[in-house]
Image (spheres, helix red, strand yellow):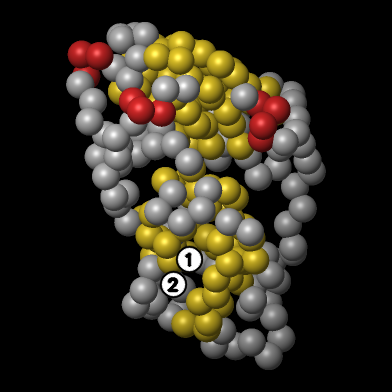
């Protein structure tokens, strides 16, 4: 699903980008953010992006990876029956939502591009990511490792991909491609991944009610 962000496009003069992302053993890789940046930046006209919601369910961030366009406001409702303390120390966005239940009154605005790593001070295993895109043409792969970004204005693009566990830097994934006025342009990435290191999920002594 493409973040349209008020793009002024006509379907008659727009193409699609279909991306396939696999891991080092050719297995489908979900939660990979694929981005397409037009080399002619004047082709983009945007409006204010719509707000997003990033839930906390069963002591997990849902979804695990949330791509948003720069300037997007994100709400963090806590749907658990315990309190959470959401925070990030990432350069792209530093913030804290002290212990709370329900939904904080004010959303968090992600106003700089980059990767924002989320955590919870109470539940160490809670890790999530907000990817703040500098282009309105982006989406993330599903369980089958594919994603289609629709209705791109025709022209030259740089496409790239990001995943939380990728070994190589994001800049090394850049590929140049052409989008035609109609039809589908396909691109594939094979990403070597770092080993997944997640803190063990376990009850925390003395934290009942948290």
Q: Secondary structure at mark 2?
A: loop
Which quadrant of the structure image shows residue 198?
A: bottom right
Q: How many marks?
A: 2
Q: Is residue 44 above or below residue 67?
A: above
Q: CA distance from mark 2 to mark 1?
A: 5 Å
Residue sitting at 70 percent across and 42 percent down? 165
Residue 48 falls left or right of residue 120: left
Q: Nearer the viewer, residue 200 or 100?
A: 100
Q: Which residue is mark 2?
A: 78
| Image location (x, y in percent) of residue 37 | 47, 28
Tag 1 residue: 56
**Residue 56, placed above or below residue 84:** above
In this rendered view, identify the residue nearer to me: 62 or 92. 92
Residue found at x 47% / y 22%: 39
Does any portion of residue 144 appear in the rendered image? no
Residue 40 falls in image quadrant: top left
Circles 2 and 1, Cβ within 8 Å, touching? The answer is: yes
What percent of the width, then of the height, locates residue 130? Answer: 53, 53
Residue 121 visible in rendering: yes
């Amino acid at each position: 699903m493409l973040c349209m962000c008020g793009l002024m496009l006509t379907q008659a003069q727009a193409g699609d980008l279909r991306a396939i992302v696999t891991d080092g053993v050719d297995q489908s890789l979900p939660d990979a953010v694929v981005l397409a940046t037009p080399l002619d930046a004047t082709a983009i006209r945007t409006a204010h992006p719509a707000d997003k919601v990033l839930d906390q369910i069963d002591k997990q961030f849902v979804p695990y990876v949330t791509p948003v366009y720069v300037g997007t406001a994100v709400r963090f409702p806590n749907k658990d029956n315990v309190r959470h303390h959401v925070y990030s120390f990432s350069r792209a966005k530093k913030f804290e939502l002290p212990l709370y239940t329900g939904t904080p009154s004010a959303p968090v605005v992600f106003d700089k591009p980059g990767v924002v790593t989320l955590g919870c001070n109470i539940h160490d295993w809670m890790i999530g990511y907000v990817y703040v895109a500098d282009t309105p043409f982006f989406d993330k792969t599903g369980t089958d490792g594919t994603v289609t970004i629709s209705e791109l204005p025709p022209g030259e693009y740089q496409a790239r991909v990001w995943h939380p566990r990728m070994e190589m830097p994001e800049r090394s994934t850049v590929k140049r491609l052409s989008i035609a006025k109609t039809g589908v342009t396909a691109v594939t990435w094979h990403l070597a991944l770092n080993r997944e290191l997640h803190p063990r999920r376990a009850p925390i002594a003395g934290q009942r009610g948290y």
